[in-house]
Amino acid sequence: MGKIKSAICITLFTLLIAALCFVCAVSFSYGTDGVHTFNSILRLTAKDADLGAKYGSDGYLGGGYTVVYYPEGVISAKEYEENSASYTDESELQKYKDRYVAYADGAIYLDKDEVCGGGNEPAESYLADFDATYELLFDRYANLKKDGVRLEKRDKLTVSVFLPKELMQNELYAFTVHSYTGAVTVRYGTSTDSSAAETVLPARADKTIGDYVKKFSSRTAADGTAYVVIDFTDLGREVIAAKTADATSGTLFFMAGENSLIPLSVSSQIDQESLYISGTYTKESAEICATALNTALKGDGQDYLSLTLGDSHRSEALYGANALYGLFIAFGVCFLAMMIFFFVRYGALGFAHLYTYLIMTFIMILCVWSIPFLYLSTETLLAYLIVSVVFSACNALVFERARKEFALGKTMTSSVKTAYRQNFWHIFDLHIILAALSFIVYGIALTNLSAFAFVLGLGTVFSGLCVLGLNRFMWAIMMAFTRNKGRFCNFKREVVDDD
Amino acid sequence: MTKRPTKLLPVWIAVSAVILIAGIVLFALMGFNTSPEARNNKTVEVSYGVAVEITTGAEEKLQETCEAAFEANGLKPIHENLVVEIDSNSGSVTGDKKLVYTFSDSATGAALEAARAQIDAAKSEFPVTADIFVSVHGGEGSLFGESIWRGAIALAVGAIVVLVYIGVRFGIGAALTGLTVCVHDSLVALAFLAIARIPVYAFAPLLYAGVAAVVSLLLWLVQCIKMRENFKEPSFKSLSAEEAVAESGKTALAWILGVGGAIALAIAVCGGLATAGVRLFLLPALVPVAVAFYSSLLLGPALHVHVKAAFDKRKLKSKRYIGKAKAQETKD
């Protein structure tokens, strides 16, 4: 390539890298008193619950939400104290205090009649119902399949749940819907009030809801519309068809206990095996709704405790406020070490590696930012760390081969050509194996292993393209300016002994 | 005279077997040391109203009071977090906050109760409207099993597919050794974590098994590339399987040390410079890298000597057979 063309290319690449660096990594405030903020892509990228960073004036990406579910008859110590303080009449206060008994070292208070059967310890039947309710919640939250979801029994009789903030869009909806523990029923009425509607399924006392409804599931159409799908049995279809035969402006309520989960407007007869209900659902909220109904359907006949949503809190990065910045600094140190190695060993050829690596890194940042299911986490950063090593090793492999060829007396062009030709299949094998392993693991695994694998796979693909394509191009355009190409790359000819 | 590592297969097998058996036993008895996760934990929660936040220095003072109370009672929180209360329907902030101090399950109830009482007694030093409330809780976390078994299947399927590719490109012998080494590394890494009781997050062991599989395949591939390159050379034709693998291993040594060392160094640097939470995740990741090092330099080549010898023998037999057949043909 000619010098002019090379100069143009280098200038363009430099400008591209500078622009990408600015967009990806630089944040600043501007305007009067810095009221406006320019947020870098890194700041705007979703973070998992363990990492987090501020963006804009008061925004925060990362961390998560915690709620505590209190089953019927159980209140927190704080609530107990606040209620006690509200009584002015001493006898009323005593009556209130007699009604409750402290439990789990005073962390919670139990209604003696409702929970303990009049005694001071929870009744066996209540404990069994609580265990069943915990299992129901476990199934519902496990079905979310999100990285960072945590569920724990707190104080033996409450349930604490943590959901990551950035990896979900409907956390609060999930908290609410998953607290609905009653049996599934279908009601039909002409008003929008579900409590006034008539129960149509189960239609007979000797039948269960499972005789009418096969399952609830969710689907997402190609255009992105999300549906909750209800599959009726033949009997269920018949009953619904009969009930809605003369419908003009009714509502069909799909209930979990006394809570309406799906209010479906009916203007004509419904006579279908499967009902696809859209509306304002997203893929995630449709899944949450279907899971809540399906788990309630499967647990039909089981006694579940009704749950109240208690203390709800939002927390920031679980690894600490500076965890992300600490990781960036660590990455910076590794990057510096890598560049020192390349500049010391290969001289100005290190620039070719630097340019290619920076472009690959910025492309990866843009991918993690723009691909909806990707996020910044220690796992994804570890994956990129491995990709960086593979990329550097492959570049070093090519450079070393070229060094050997050059030492034997070949021209630089011939050495580069031979180095790439001889190492092509090695680099190809390395990348194809890593990418295949990564994408297979991504396809099967869940949560953080899946995210790790996808970033590793994506990074491997970019690494392969950069090593075999971009890096060679960079080498060619950067070397065009120098007469002494060997010196440029820090390559030396082998000294031949005349003797 | 020192023996070549390729001749010491029984030693490497014994080392791996001891680690694996001890690891399985300890895992069955005690599981992994997931203390950083604090799945079974105790917490002291100090909630307070907006009055504390708007009073200059009150938040810091409350924090100091809590820390002093824990220190006085011999308690050391493994994690502390400041959370803000939200409305569970709208997600809007109510203004109240809560300091959550997490302790390991071994923290005694009496010490926690004493600390709680001490913090409670200090309430009078804060504004009347501070609304400070201190409570002690016990938690028992659950682990979602599906992600674990699906992760294990994913790694197994991925490794098999990749080794089929290695089989096609480098020969069935290399694939068999690679498969053994890959499975070995994943299991030994997990066993070592169980034996050494290295503190890990609950989700992390499977990820470390994944890292072990990836690094192991990477380093074994370097060996395979070098072996294929070297075995084509005429000087290697006359060598026995043991000598050929050992000689090839020498040429691959620099690359294995370079690639594995760079990964280990990068993880160590990141782990060393990162905050405590990240360090707990990154530093144990050195275990799978170290195991992959061990197997690619010692166990893998020693095992491959026998695999290569068996395949060479088969190849030779097949050659002899063809020779006889041809001879018969000529005779006929």
Image (tube, coloured by chain):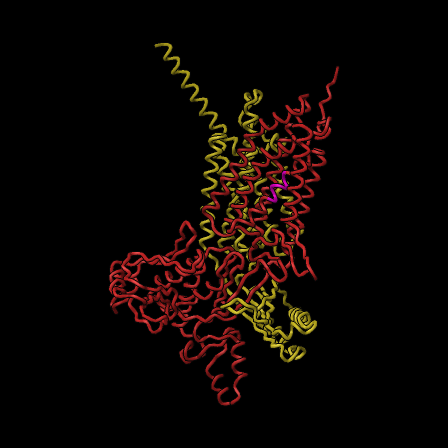
Q: Which chain does red denote in the image?
A: A
Chain drawn yellow in the picture: B
B141 lies above or below A468:
below
Q: Nearer the viewer, residue A372 or B204?
A: A372
Q: Residue at x 49, y 28 (%)?
A: B309
Q: Residue furthest top?
A: B331
Q: Which residues are magenta?
A: A356-362
Quarter of the image for the N terminus of chain A: give it: top right
Camera sees residue B194: no
Q: Is residue B237 visible?
A: yes
Horizontal side of A289 relative to B118 (left or right) equals: left
Which residue is more in the foreground, B3 or B155? B155
Query: Where does the image place residue A234, in percent across and percent down from the top left?
Result: 25, 58
- The answer to whether A114 is drawn above or below residue B106 in the figure is below
- Residue occupying image coordinates x 31% and y 68%: A188
Q: Quadrant of residue B105?
A: bottom right
Q: Is residue A337 left or right of residue A224?
A: right
**Predominant SS along the magenta part:** helix
Residue A433 higher or lower than A261, as above or below? above
Please tell me which residue is depicted at 60% across the width and 38% down the height of the picture.
A391
Decide if residue B313 is on the left or right side of residue B42: left
The total number of labels drawn is 0
Q: On the image, which quarter does residue B294 sit in?
A: top right
Please tell me which residue lies in front, B326 or A297: A297
Image position, residue B120 (x, y; %): 62, 77
> What residue lies at 60% left-to-right and 77% top-to-bottom?
B131
Residue B65 placement: quadrant: bottom right
Q: Quadrant of the C terminus of chain A?
A: top right
* Residue B73 in the image, given as x and y percentages of width and height: 64, 70
Asked whether A344 falls inside the magenta stretch, the response is no
Rendered location of residue A187, percent (x, y): 32, 68
